[in-house]
Image: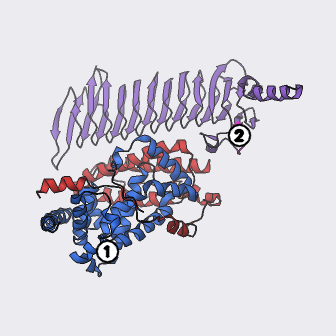
Chain colours: A red, B blue, C purple
Amino acid sequence: MGENELRWALRQLPRDIEPPRDLWPGIAARLPATRPARWRPGWLAGLAMAASLCLAVGITWHQARPPAPDVQAQLVQREAQALTREYEAALLQFEGAPLPAPIEPALATLDQSAAEIRRAMDSDPGARFLLDQLRRTYSRRLSLTQRAVTG
Amino acid sequence: MLNTAVDIHATPSDTDAAPRDEDHALVRAAGGGDVRAFEQLYRRHARRVFAVLWRLCGHEARAEDLVQEAFVRAWQALPGFRFESAFSTWLHRLAVNTALMDLRARRGGEALETDDEALDAHATPDSAGHRTALGLDLERAIATLPPRARAVLVLYDIEGWKHEEIAAELGMAVGSSKAQLHRARQLLRARLGEDHGRE
Amino acid sequence: MTTRTVWCTALLVSASLPALAATPIHQVRPLSAEGTVSIDNVKGRIVVRTWDRAEVGITGTLGEGVEKLLVEGTADDLRIEVRNPSGGGGWFGWGGDGGRSGPSVIEVSVPARAGVKVDSVSASVAISGVAGRRLSVDTVSGNVVVSAARPGEASIDSVSGDLDLDLETASLAVDSVSGDVRVKGRLSGSVEINTVSGDAELSAGRLERLALNSVSGDSRVRAGLAPGGRISSDSVSGGLTLTLPADTSARLRVETFSGGISSPVGKVQTEEYGPGKRLEARLGAGGGEIRLESFSGDVRVEIE
C-alpha cells in the first residue's frame, strides 16, 4: 500500500481498547502504601520560608557595557535554569495540599504564562526582560499557592 | 466475554470543557487521598491508556502490568498535577513514559521482536474482536516492528505526537525520530504487502 | 395541621428568607483623623465612603452562617473582619465546597484622610472619596471600583477580579493575573501596572515613571512624560499601544523579537544577530526615555 494510505489507516485505528480483564483491583491493592492520604497542615512553618521567594535574579550588570550577545544568552539561560529549579523545589512543598477550586483557573493561567515565557526564551535566549517576567510569574504562582493553602 | 472498543476517541485537544472539569474535580479529590475518585479516573481513562501501551510494547500481557504501573505512578504524582493541562494529556504522557522506561530496561530481551513470536501474541480471539481485516493486519504488523521504530510510529502516526516530543521522550535527536518513523513505515508497508498474500 | 407543625413549618420557611436570616449591622467607633481602617470580607460586598466625622460607621448585613463581625483595635488602627466559622476569613470559606456562609455586605464610612486597607476574596469592592496616606486593596475574584479617591499612594492587587480605578495619586501600583485593569484620573509621579493575561488601559497625565508589564494581556496607554521621565514596558505576547502628547521629549526605543512595530517616527530595523526588530528615534529634545520591549506582541506608538 502507498504511504498516504498507510498513514490514513494508522490514524483510523481505535484509540480506546478494553483491557482483557479489570485491572483496577491490582492497582487499588498498591495504592494506600504509596503516599499519605492527607496532606498534613503541620508543615506550614516551613512553607512560609519556601514561598518567601528567594527567587532573586543573580545577574546584575551595568548598562554601560552589556556583554556580547552569546555571553548574555548563556548568563540568562543559566539564571533561568537556576530560577526554575528553585521554583520547582518551592512548589514541591505544597504537593498534596488541597486547593480551593475557584483558584485553579488563576494557577492554570500562571502556569501557562510561565510556559509561554520559557518558550519565548528558547527563541530569544538573551532577552533579559523575559527572565524578569519568568521570575515575576513564578513568584506570583508561589505566593498565590501559599495563600490558597494557608487560607 | 470481552468487548473490544472500536470507537475512535477524540484527541485531547478536542475534548470539550465539561469532561475536563469533571476530571479536574476527580483529580482534586484523588489528590487528597480519595481512592474512589481515583477509581473513577481509572474507569474514564483506562481504555485509552491500555490502547497506547498495548501497541507500544507489542505484547498484551505486559501491557496490562504497565497500565497498572502507570496508574500507580499517576496516583503518586497526582498532587503535583498542574491544572493548566487536561488530565488525560498528563496521564497519557505519564503512561507513555512508564512504557518507554520499561522498554529501555528490557533492551536485552528483544526476542519478542521476531515476527513469529509477535504474531503468536496476537492470535488470541480477544484482539481479533470486531476490527476490519486491515485493522487486524495492521495491529499485528505494528507489533512486529523493532521496539524503537514501533514506538516512534505509534506516537507519531497514531497518537499524534510531534517529533520534538518523541525525541525528548525517547532520548534521541529529532532527526533520529524522523529516520525511525521512515523506517517503521517502510517496514510496515513491506509486511502488509506480505500479509495480504497470507489472508 | 397542628399548631406545632405550623410553627415548625413557619420556622423552616423563615430560615430561607434573607431578610430574617441575615443579621443587620450598625456600629460606630472613634477614629483619629489619619488613622487606618482595615476591612476583611471574603464574600459579598465591601463599600467604603468618606464622611466628615472622626468616626468609623459600619452598616450592612452579615450573611447567614457567618460567625460574627469582628471590630477591634484602637482609634489609630481599626480592624473590621467578617469572621466565618471555619476559623478566620480564609479561602476555605470560599466557593461551593465549604462556602457555608452567605455573603455579607459591609458598608464603612471613614474620615476622609483615613488610610484604608481592604481584603476580599470574592466580595466586590467599591471605594470612593478616600484621601488618606495609603489605599490598599487585595482581591482574588471580586471586582474593584475606585472613584473620586485621592490617596497619597495606592496599591491594588487582584487575581481574576476586574479593576476599575479613577483616582488621583502620585504613586500607584496595580497587579493583576487575569483581571482586566482600567485606570484613569489625575495621575502623576509613578505608575506601575503588572498583568499576566489581563488587559490594561491607562489614561494618565505626565508621569515621572510608568512601568507596564504583561505576559499575554494587551495594553492601551495614553500618558505623557514629566521632564526626564521614563516609560518602560515589556510584554511576551500581549500587544501595546502607547499614545503620547505632541510635545513629548524623549529617546524612544522599541524592540521586539517577532512582533510588529508601528511608529510615526524612526525606522524599523532588523537585528544584526538573527531575528528581531528594533526602532530608535528621538522625540523633541530627547530628554526622557521610553523603552518598549516585547517578544511577539505588536508595539504601536502614536503621537497626538
Are marks 1 and 2 in one subunit?
no
Helix, strand or loop at disc 1? helix
Taking the image as drawn, is residue A82 in sight? no
In percent of the image, x 40 and y 38: which residue is there?
C197
Q: Is residue B81 rendered to the left or right of residue C44?
A: left
Q: Amino acid at mark 1?
A: Arg
Q: Main secondary structure of the magenta part?
A: loop
Q: Nearer the viewer, mark 1 or mark 2?
A: 1
Q: In this rendered view, identify the residue nearer to me: B94 or C190.
A: B94
Report x, y in % for residue C5.
85, 29
Q: Nearer the viewer, residue B32 or B54?
A: B54
Residue C85 counted in the magenta span: yes
Q: Is residue C62 above or below residue C304?
A: below
The chain letter for the residue carrying disc 2 is: C
Vertical arrangement, residue C21 with respect to residue A68, above or below: above
Q: Which residues are magenta?
A: C82-87
Q: Quadrant of residue C117?
A: top right
Mark 1 chain: B
> Residue B113 at x, y = what percent?
24, 76
Residue bearing the label numbered 1: B104
The furthest residue to the left: A2
Amino acid at the residue labelled 2: Asn
Residue at numbered disc 2? C84
- Can you give x and y, in whole percent of width and height, for residue C14 in the image? 77, 26
Q: Residue at x 68, y 39 (%)?
A: C100
**Is B19 placed above or below B138 here?**
above
Q: CA distance from mark 1 to mark 2?
A: 55 Å
Indicate left or right for B172 with C108 as reference: left
Q: Nearer the viewer, residue A29 or C53?
A: A29
